[in-house]
Image (tube, rainbow, N blue to C red):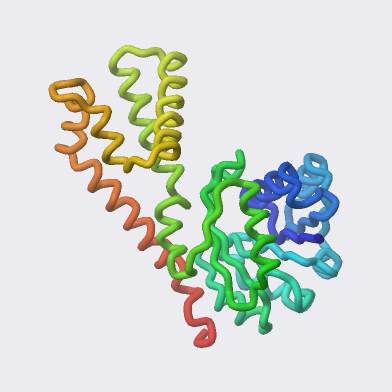
């Protein structure tokens, strides 16, 4: 199934890596175009054995899937360049944050099957938490193709398009929140006298173990936390500090603000007919 990637950034590469590794796509089915960075195209071609080109018409010819992987600010230009070469039956998948399905449909001036996807940076190691939203023209076969593609880079959930801002705030930006926690744990480890080479593996395994516990048990996060706490114990003493500093509330505000920012960034792509 010929698949064209418009854009050659890190997220495009993550999807390509996962698709090839899982067998969702063969390397010789993948074509990538990038507007100016020849070295980047050569790098991807050498690394994965895929096809690269600057010829938009050629790369889109007979493509079953077209993945828009440019920066959101370049969305209009990218769509304008590809729309006249799109096959009517092509599935358009957008990785462009904030760019709505209606905007893409309006700019392509056709009734294309369109899917918006919101992966996160853990896609680079096949551990993304991805949400996708579909328009009414997506067939069952196209939906299953998209699910196979994104499942190759991690977990995939289908959501309503209006939920994608919340997904962006929660899991799209989510890895950074966890890294922030890890930073704090690293700083604390240094202050309490643990060498970095000792502390870092312990921190990583602690985070991995907690994630596995959440996944493997039926318990809620609150229940699992309370199960670790003993009256008068060390965990209770530590949690008491977090509660006094309103850390949970800060995380809630963090995610709601990230969600609000996603909505603000998407405003230029709302109501495309009025533009």
Could you say which is closer to the camera, residue 275 or residue 99?
A: 99
Question: Is residue 258 positioned above or below 98 on the image?
Answer: above
Q: Residue at x 43, y 14 (%)?
A: 198
Question: Is residue 193 positioned above or below 20 on the image?
Answer: above
How far across and how far down the image is residue 114, in percent? Answer: 63, 71
Viewport quadrant of the N terminus: bottom right
Q: Picture quarter containing residue 188? A: top left
Q: Is residue 17 left or right of residue 248?
A: right
Q: Is residue 40 left or right of residue 241?
A: right
Could you say which is closer to the camera, residue 19 or residue 264?
A: 19
Q: Residue at x 37, y 56 (%)?
A: 258
Q: Is residue 227 left or right of residue 60?
A: left
How far across and how far down the image is residue 15, in percent? Answer: 66, 50
Q: Residue at x 66, y 69 (%)?
A: 140
> How many numbered dots are placed on residues in this image?
0
Q: Is residue 53 left or right of residue 16?
A: right
How far across and how far down the image is residue 96, in percent? Answer: 57, 62
How far across and how far down the image is residue 180, in percent? Answer: 38, 37
Q: Picture quarter containing residue 213? A: top left
Question: Is residue 267 positioned above or below 190 on the image?
Answer: below
Question: Given the current orientation, which residue lies at the most extreme front position?
Answer: 218
Question: Given the current orientation, which residue lies at the most extreme bottom position?
Answer: 274
Q: Residue at x 74, y 71 (%)?
A: 90
């Amino acid at each position: 199934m010929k698949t064209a990637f418009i854009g050659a950034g890190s997220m495009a590469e993550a999807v390509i890596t996962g698709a090839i590794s899982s067998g969702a796509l063969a390397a010789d089915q993948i074509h990538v175009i990038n507007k100016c960075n020849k070295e980047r195209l050569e790098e991807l071609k050498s690394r994965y054995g895929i096809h690269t080109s600057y010829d938009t018409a050629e790369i889109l010819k007979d493509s079953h899937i077209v993945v828009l992987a440019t920066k959101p600010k370049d969305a209009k230009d990218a769509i304008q360049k590809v729309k006249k070469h799109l096959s009517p039956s092509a599935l358009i998948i957008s990785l462009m944050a904030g760019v709505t399905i209606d905007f893409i449909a309006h700019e392509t001036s056709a009734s294309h099957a369109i899917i918006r996807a919101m992966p996160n940076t853990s896609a680079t190691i096949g551990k993304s938490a991805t949400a996708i939203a579909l328009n009414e023209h997506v067939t069952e076969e196209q939906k299953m193709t998209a699910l196979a593609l994104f499942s190759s880079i991690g977990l995939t959930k289908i959501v309503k398009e209006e939920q994608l801002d919340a997904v962006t705030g929660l899991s799209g930006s989510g890895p950074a929140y966890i890294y922030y926690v890890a930073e704090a744990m690293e700083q604390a480890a240094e202050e309490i006298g643990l060498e970095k080479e000792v502390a870092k593996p312990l921190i990583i395994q602690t985070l991995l173990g907690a994630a596995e516990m959440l996944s493997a048990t039926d318990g809620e996060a609150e229940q699992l936390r309370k199960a670790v706490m003993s009256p008068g114990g060390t965990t209770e003493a530590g949690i008491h500090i977090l509660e006094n500093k309103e850390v949970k509330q800060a995380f809630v505000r963090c995610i709601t603000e990230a969600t609000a920012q996603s909505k603000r960034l998407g405003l230029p792509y709302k109501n495309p007919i009025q533009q």
